[in-house]
Amino acid sequence: MKDLIKSLVEAWGPSGYEHHVRELIRGYAEPYADSIEVDALGNLICRVGQGEGKQRIMVAAHMDEIGLIATFQEPRSGYLRFTPLGGLIHTTLHGSRVRFENGVTGVIGAPEPLGSSRQNAPDLDSFYIDISDGDGAAAVAPGTAAAFWRPLEERGIRLIAKSMDDRIGCVVALEAMRLLAKETPHEVYFAFTVQEEVGIRGARPAAHSIDPDIAIALDVTLAGDEYKGERNGIRLGAGAAIKVQDPGLIVPPAIRDWMISRAEADGIPYQLELLKAGTTDAAQIQSVRAGVPSGCISIPCRFIHTTSETVDMRDVEACVQLLTGLLKH
Amino acid sequence: MDTTLLKSLSEAHGISGREDAVRKIILEAIYGHASDIRIDPLGSITAIKRGTVAGAPRVMLAAHMDEVGFMVAGVDGDGLVRFTAVGSIDDRILPGMRMKIGANAIPGVVIWTPIHIGREQSVVKLANLRIDIGASSKDDANGKVKLGDMIVFDSYFGELGAAMVRGKALDDRAGCALLIDVLRGGPYPVDVLAAFTVQEEIGLRGAQVAAQTLNPDVAFVLETTTANDIPNPLAVPDEMDEPNPTCRIQGGPVFTILDRSVIVNPRLLQFLRATADKHSIPYQLKTQPGGGTDGGSIHLANGGVATAVISNPSRYIHSPVTYLHRDDFDNTLRLVQAVLHDVNRDVLASLR
């Protein structure tokens, strides 16, 4: 599973430009899917199972990562201006490295990285990207997207990378597909969605096409065990996080209890998640067509929306086991 | 450019939700040039111009009928009219602005303090502004205007020399005029699914329903966007604080890379650029991602629709005087018609 994680988290795929990630995932999914389609927005939808009179279940994990897009090049200095794709944290930007699709590496800077009062980060408009290479060969046209760049690091049982949000959710889905080996009493649609980070755009049309009975989103959630962190009860290594609610979704108790009883029956460690800020694909899926009861299995994660998103392999395993168990029964 | 048509569209009163007068002009203009002309429950016009090639893509073109404006929110004891904005309008441009209120187009002016009394330069918030219709009392005012009456900029359509036109509401009546010209032209190989939408300025509402109904294979939004190509006295060229230009007058049709509502499919954007190059039509990329368009709703309709945004560049949108250059309108029309000839099933397949 580590090889799969490494290949997905190091892949390039900011919101709206998920095509490389999609082709990687398609390659991994092909042996375990009964059919694979790409819709008009670029969502990759893999069907497993024929239904046999049971449920149509949608499983959603988003392929995109936060990034940015070059909008303008200063005519003389050559610095690029950009606009964000997703929620960038300003205090992490100065000195960050990005990679454009054509391979050019850029470094983000700001004239006053600590802010004029040294108290708060400058506005996004103050940042620029340096792509100079000394002889003017490196070129990035306006309209070219970039993703942050850091390789995967292992520290014992913990993994540190950019874009764990939400490639680790994609990994959980792919691992569950592999373990199911096309054996499920349900008709399961694994949707690898686009454009979650810019406002949950891909999941809605995907759910419209799939027209599921129930849905499960897979995404990272804020671990509350960071130093002086929000005490939300979520700890790294304490198991799969079964969502109770977030600002965009109140999980129907039947869905929540379905997940809890499966975890308890199979002896899978779990924790309950009440998230105060942020939401997932499930927030949109729940209101598609006549409504879709939706839940979420979350992977606890530290330092979300930075290049050092940290997860614990025990939690990842627990999420895979829980999802597989739910889809098998 | 049909200047007479654009003039009547520009001068029609039609804030979001009150597009009736605009709808009437468009219905008359497209009659006989399209089939299946319908008014949907929200008030958008949908119409179809059948293509000449069987099985060709169904291409949605959308332009919004509504304009930004205001609504009467009440009358003060002294007969001054309180008002609220419908759509985004900069408070700074309001003092001294002439307005027309309601079905009888009652004229009024937004109050301000003459410079003899107030030399303060700070912005007055809309909540503290009123419209003076010359009423002597609350009763007098209530006889002329009522709560909920539509308020529009008191403006006229005019020609500035041979090349430029000015008028209110060219965002997006210029897009409506383009779409009318598309329907009057042709024939095209593809089915053109035209949507003149309502309520774009308050949240892309009409387009959502129109796109769900039309269920197109691909969509192009015809818009009018900000050309911020005016000098900024504070900027030193090429310094860090230089503002990004968005697009410029006479630069040709503007292609959106992304805005707050949609990330344009990069392969569809590439198709637009290639089409413009092939037909030697100048174009520009919108390098400032502010605002949203009907594309935000359309691309999420049903199972998803590959959507791009093509705009006329124009100065001073969301004001009584928007400037539009004939060359830009003509080039945008040429581009849209070229797209309708060149888009086919192979292009659609390449988008995925």
Image (cartoon, helix red, strand yellow):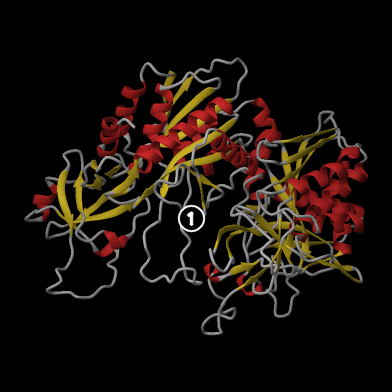
Whole-percent x, y for residue B83 in the image: 25, 54
Which residue in the rendered view is the most extreme toward the bottom?
Answer: A118
Residue A264: name its quadrant. Answer: bottom right
Residue B90, quarter of picture: bottom left
- Which residue is drawn at the image coordinates 47% and 52% (left, top)? B291
Q: Which residue is drawn at 42% across and 47% down?
A: B225
Position of A305 relative to A191 (above/below): below
| Place of residue A94 in the rendered image (x, y in percent of width and height, measured from the top left) | 64, 74
Indicate the quadrant containing the N terminus of chain B: top left, top right, bottom left or bottom right. top left
Is residue A329 at all visible to an observer of this figure? no
Q: From the image, which quarter does the C terminus of chain B lie in?
A: top right
- Give the SS element for disc 1: loop
Q: Which residue is denoted by mark 1 in the rendering? A: B290
- As drawn, is B132 to the left or to the right of B195? left
Please say if B76 is above or below B25. below
On the picture, is A147 further left or further right than B53? right
